[in-house]
Amino acid sequence: MSLHRDIYWLGRQWAVTGYGIQAVDQKRFGHYDVEAARIGDEEVVAALQALDWFDLDDFRAAMHHVKRRPASARTPGFGGPLGGSGGEK
């Protein structure tokens, strides 16, 4: 899967998009993208942490940006348990 057209934050390895958190490297074919409803799911994070290429700091930064997205600015279906009410700058 390619990156969703709505990109809210772009890190070295992860991006916050209208889909959720997606791997920037498209050679991974979307296999490790985390849909919005699963953001914060400990099993998903644990599975990703087991991968040798996984950058935890960049993923944490992506999660930080998810929390900062205001509810009114999220696309339908985006949000999940980490949705915040603060704005991005």
Image (cartoon, rainbow, N blue to C red):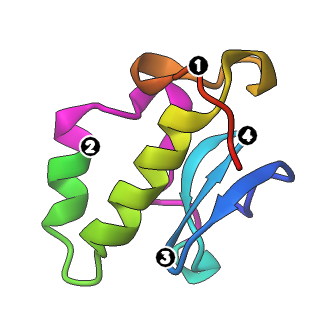
Of labels 1 and 4, the one closer to you: 1
Q: Amino acid at mark 3?
A: Gln
Residue that badge 2 annotates = 44
Extent of the magenta region: 29-44
Of labels 2 and 3, the one closer to you: 3
Q: Secondary structure at mark 4?
A: loop
Tell me which numbered mark, 1 or 4, is placed earlier along the sequence: 4
Residue that badge 1 annotates = 85
Distance of label 1 from label 4 (alpha carbons): 17 Å
Distance of label 4 from label 3 (alpha carbons): 17 Å
Distance of label 4 from label 2 (alpha carbons): 18 Å
Q: Amino acid at mark 1?
A: Ser
Q: Secondary structure at mark 2?
A: helix
Tell me which numbered mark, 2 or 1, is placed earlier along the sequence: 2
* Residue 30: in magenta span: yes
Distance of label 1 from label 3 (alpha carbons): 25 Å
In the image, which disc is placed on residue 13? 3
Q: Amino acid at mark 4?
A: Gly
Q: Is residue 86 above or below residue 1?
A: above
Residue that badge 4 annotates = 18
In which quadrant of the rendered image does the N terminus lie? bottom right
Distance of label 2 from label 3 (alpha carbons): 16 Å
Of labels 1 and 3, the one closer to you: 1
The reply to whether callout 2 and callout 3 are in contact (CB within 8 Å) is: no
Q: Nearer the viewer, residue 64 or 89?
A: 89
Residue located at (48% from left, 55% from top): 62
Q: Decide if residue 87 is in sight here.
A: yes
